[in-house]
Image: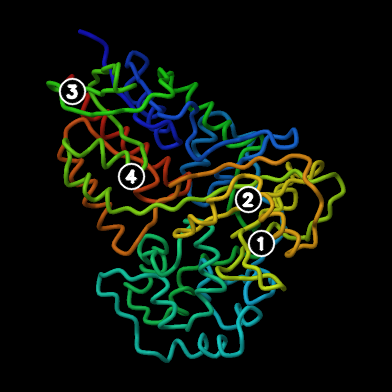
Amino acid sequence: MRALRVAVVGGGVSGLAAAHRLRHLLGPAVEITVVEQAHRLGGKLRTAEVGGRAYDVGAEAFLHRRPEAAELVAELGLGDRLVHPGRAAASIHAGGATRSVPAHTLMGVPASVEAVRHVLSPEGVRRVAAEPTLPPIRLDGGDVAVGTLLTERFGPEVGERLVGPLLGGVYAGRTEHLGLRATMPQLASALDSGVGSLLAAAATAIPAPPRSGVPRPPVFGTLRDGLSTLVDRLAEVSGARLRLGLPVRALARAGHGWRLEIGSAAAPEHLDVDGVVLAVPAPAARRLLADVAPAASRRYGEVELASMAVVALALPPGTGLPERSGVLLAEGERDADGVPFTAKAFTFSGRKWDHLAGEPVLVRGSVGRHGEAHLLQRDDDELVAAVRHDLARLTGVEARPVDVVVTRWGGGLPQYGVGHLDLVRDIEDAVAAVPGLAVAGATLHGVGIPACIATGDAAAARVASHVLGRIR
């Protein structure tokens, strides 16, 4: 009998987590092949050298409260490299002023009036205080756009000044398009339970503070030498054969297994395997599933994408930055001369992460929300100049960088619109009807690293179960 063979299409963290788990489930004899269209692994995890230092220019951290990433880091023997943010607070620039991100909010949704009094106008504060007197919210199992609900209950300011910048940082999206159930599931659950007020729902959903004397657990984590360390270790321990720089052009059933057509159209290769994990962005999944799971393909085609860019700046030694971890910018904000800001966020990395303190001074500017492709239609020099202008107007820092790295993520972030959970259910139901096939990735259950790892693990378990079932 020939060796078992499985293929993972996509070399991002979802695909590599799937390859690692397949190795664990199927043992050392299985042949695992990871096929990645790009010439490098990692997807949105990329560590570059900026000013002579390892610096993440894609995802910079993972949610530590969700266990999948932290557990995988420990499993891979990387626990000694795990670090957490320092104590510097984040800030938001909204309404023409920069203020601390308020505590006692859920992704910006206030759990009390006092939490947001310093961020909103008197009228905005009045609207928040009056929200519990409005008729109770009844979702009746449906979904709603975050922005629509916020405006109806609080008026425009909470969405514009708080929730919009925070969700824009995670999804590169706009509140008027993002669905409540996929982006704020805790809030939706509280409302489903009968809590009729947004203020009360946020208060219900916020984790209880730790007992006196008990340290607060860290919210975020990252790896000291960059998140590409995780990518490299996953590739190593999976023992997978890596095929980089090769698109997968077609996927078809072949007997009891699958045939992948990879490489150039003029001289394609064929790879025959017993099972396949697709861990690719929505457009690629739509194309590859068109014949084998057409219902899933159609639903993948409904997912909109946002593009963004990260401008990494290494500033000269001694450059003084605010005593904050960074600043989020509300949409539509302008500088004192009325010029719109280009950046949507800055991270003052040496303030946020102790291991990045020192020289040179590292700053990361993020550009791009859904529908803002025009901001990215500039060459690198123009984009850097715009980001430096924003930094100067926000902080007074005008120092010329000693090094700059611009990283563009075209179509990098799926948008979780209204009804996204129904869309994902339809995709997974359609794929579940196809033996030996599974899907993973940021399109499904979250764009963060832990969520992506979870989809890779689940996809690997499904494919392994099929392959082992055939043997038995």
Query: From this viewpoint, which residue is outermost toward the right?
Result: 318
Q: Earlier in the sequence, mark 2 or mark 4?
A: 4
Looking at the rendered structure, the kind of residue marked 2 is Leu
Mark 1 and mark 4 lie on one chain; the one further toward the N terminus is 4
The C terminus - image quarter: top left
Quarter assignment of residue 24:
top left
Look at the numbered disc 4 and give the secondary structure of its residue.
helix
Q: Position of residue 163 (x, y in %)?
A: 51, 69
Residue that appears at 56% across and 36% down = 46
Please tell me which of labels 2 and 1 falls first in the chain: 1
Instruction: State the separation of the CA atoms marked 1 and 4.
Output: 31 Å
Q: Which of pointers 2 and 1 indicates the residue nearer the eye?
A: 2
Mark 2 near mark 4, Cβ–Cβ under 8 Å?
Answer: no
**Which of the marked residues, 3 or 1, is nearer the chain's N terminus?**
3
Discs 1, 4 touching: Cβ within 8 Å: no
In front: mark 2 or mark 4? 2
In the rendered image, which residue does mark 1 sit on?
327
Q: Where is mark 3, residue-wise? A: 257
For the point 58% across and 50% down, the residue is: 220
For marks 2 and 3 on the same chain, the one whose residue lies earlier in the sequence = 3
Horizontally, residue 38 falls left or right of residue 259, namely right
Mark 3 → mark 1, Cα distance in angstroms: 51 Å
Q: Residue under circle 4?
A: 282
Name, please, the residue furthest toward the top. 1
From mark 2 to mark 3, how far is it between C-alphas? Answer: 48 Å
